Amino acid sequence: MRLIAGLGNPGSRYALTRHNMGFIVLDVLAGETEIPVGKRGYSSLYGVGKIGEESVILAKPQTFMNLSGVAVEKLARFFKIDRSNIIIIHDDMDIPFQELRVKENGGDGGHKGLMSIINHLGGSDFVRVRMGIGRPDLKEMVESFVLSRFSKEEMEYVPFVALRASQAVAAVISSGTQSAMNVFNARIPKKLREEEV
């Protein structure tokens, strides 16, 4: 069984903000796989189903971003899921908007949600689907930037980006992390991105 958790902050105030890219992708993945994410428990909204032949749990931690590890640990412990079978979907300022990277293992990169998960799980050997959100011009603007909503222009691309990320998650499960990295970590030419919208 695999645990797939999209990170974000609960509540309408944070909907469609950059920091909620994990929630946005998980909602698309839930729709694509027809796995409703409506059960409440383990400090999460979650659903159980299958992607291909693999049993999965789709989860949206409801602890707020900085305590994401609380929910992920509860789910992993109850369903007896090893760290290597966990996929975390999260926003990443080190990646340009519209791009994503699949990664296995590594540090937290200053992301407090990842920091919490690593601390609660006692290790970092899980898969990440890192969603690019770009970076503000000034370092002191980071907090307000990640909690800001996507612009109208950016929102035109968000459905395409989220669908591509959901396909990357499915590829990790069906073909393995390295294969998914080979396909989805390539930079997308701007012209192709515009044609997909």
Image (cartoon, helix red, strand yellow):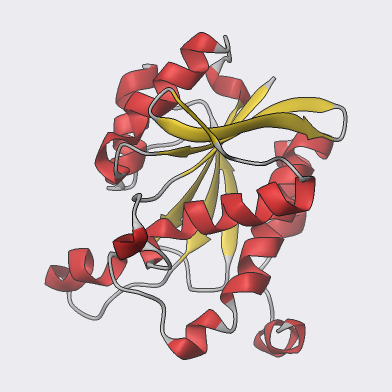
Task: Answer with left or right where residue 47 lies relative to residue 49.
Answer: left
Q: Could you tell me which quadrant the N terminus lies in?
A: top right
Indicate the quadrant where residue 12 lies. bottom left
| Residue 192 x/y as whole percent | 75, 84
Task: Answer with left or right where residue 108 lies relative to residue 47.
Answer: left
Callout count: 0
| Residue 146 x/y as whole percent | 30, 65
Indicate the quadrant where residue 25 lies. bottom right
Can residue 70 be seen here? The reply is: yes
Can residue 105 be seen here? The reply is: no
| Residue 130 x/y as whole percent | 51, 53
Name above or below for residue 151 compared with residue 125.
Answer: below
| Residue 188 x/y as whole percent | 68, 75
Indicate the quadrant where residue 140 lies. bottom left
Residue 68 vs residue 100, the one in the foreground: 68
Residue shown at 58% from the left, 61% from the top: 100
Residue shown at 29% from the left, 43% from the top: 64
Tell which residue pokes out farthest to the left in this image.
Answer: 140
Task: Answer with left or right where residue 125 lies relative to residue 48.
Answer: left
Name above or below for residue 15 compared with residue 88.
Answer: below
Residue shown at 29% from the left, 72% from the top: 148
Tell which residue pokes out farthest to the right in this image.
Answer: 53
Residue shown at 41% from the left, 58% from the top: 20
Residue 5 vs residue 95, the one in the foreground: 5
Q: Could you tell me which quadrant the C terminus lies in?
A: bottom right
